[in-house]
Amino acid sequence: METENKPQLARMPLANYNNVWEFIQTLEYNDSDNIIFLEQQLYNLLQKQPEDIYLLVLLMHEQIMNNRGQRARSIAYKIWDLGGKLELKLERMYIDDLMNLGLMDMAGAALTPYLSELENKIQAYSDLFLKYAVFTGNMGLLDRFLSYLPENNETKILKDWINLASEAKATTHLGSILTRITDNVRESLSGCRYKLFDDREFPEIEFVFYVDETIKNYQEMRGKMHLQISSYCAAHKLEDLVNLSATIVPVQRRPRQELWLEKR
């Protein structure tokens, strides 16, 4: 029987940012050989241009894919200190990865200039706006973003979630709950996204955290998060928010659902 070989990308030298941008979009999180190849190519380019923020944003993402969240955070801070203007697709990658690394304050600061012109910016940044509002538990901001978006299944469920939180008098508490459960994995975090469900008695949201190898027992951590949600609700005399759940997944199993991927 022939052994099925995993398809390999052609490993041509990557001469510039555009080559790297095209290459990085072809990679899956479990494609370790090509991720390492990409890292070598980026370091080669950065030897000539060590403060090129375009290349640094790509290296930051590669480090996330390579299960090196702490190194990616260091690069995130370096880019922040260097400053400069990024073109839209790189800016979207950078802001998304700030959130993936748990750097919500920085992501919020990067999005803040666009809040005063939402009507013009909502199209380009809508998915980033929603992710930021959801993971910070800012229901007022989420409601504001949704008011600019056409109704679809996602926006409908998010509106229902806001209404349910309001009925449970939990609107002002969701930020604290999200901070509390995220703190468990913040130092290990390499990605986050949310999943919505409308096939149950109430709208449900699942927070998915992708982590590095420093977290070993995913079920134990998940149980701890759920206990924290319940105990917070009990301490603040809230209805138990059973429509919130959390899942912990190793970063190598992260599917490609990047907010910045170019449409093919």
Image: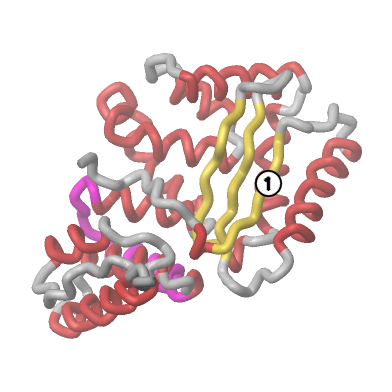
Q: Which residue is mark 1?
A: 246
Name the residue located 59 percent from the left edge and 53 percent from the top edge: 209
- Whether residue 200 can be seen here: yes
- Magenta highlight on residue 84: yes
242 over 264 or under it: above or below: above
Label 1 sits on what residue type?
A: Ala
**Which quadrant of the structure image shows residue 119?**
top left
Is 8 left, or right, of 233 in this rendering?
left
69 over 163 or under it: above or below: below
Q: What segment carries the magenta color?
A: 71-89
Is 22 left, or right, of 207 in this rendering?
left
- Whether residue 78 can be seen here: no
- Residue 88 in percent (x, y) is at 22, 45
Say which quadrant the C terminus sits in: top left
- Residue 72 in percent (x, y) is at 42, 70
Name the residue located 71 percent from the left edge and 51 percent from the top edge: 181
- Residue 219 in percent (x, y) is at 75, 58
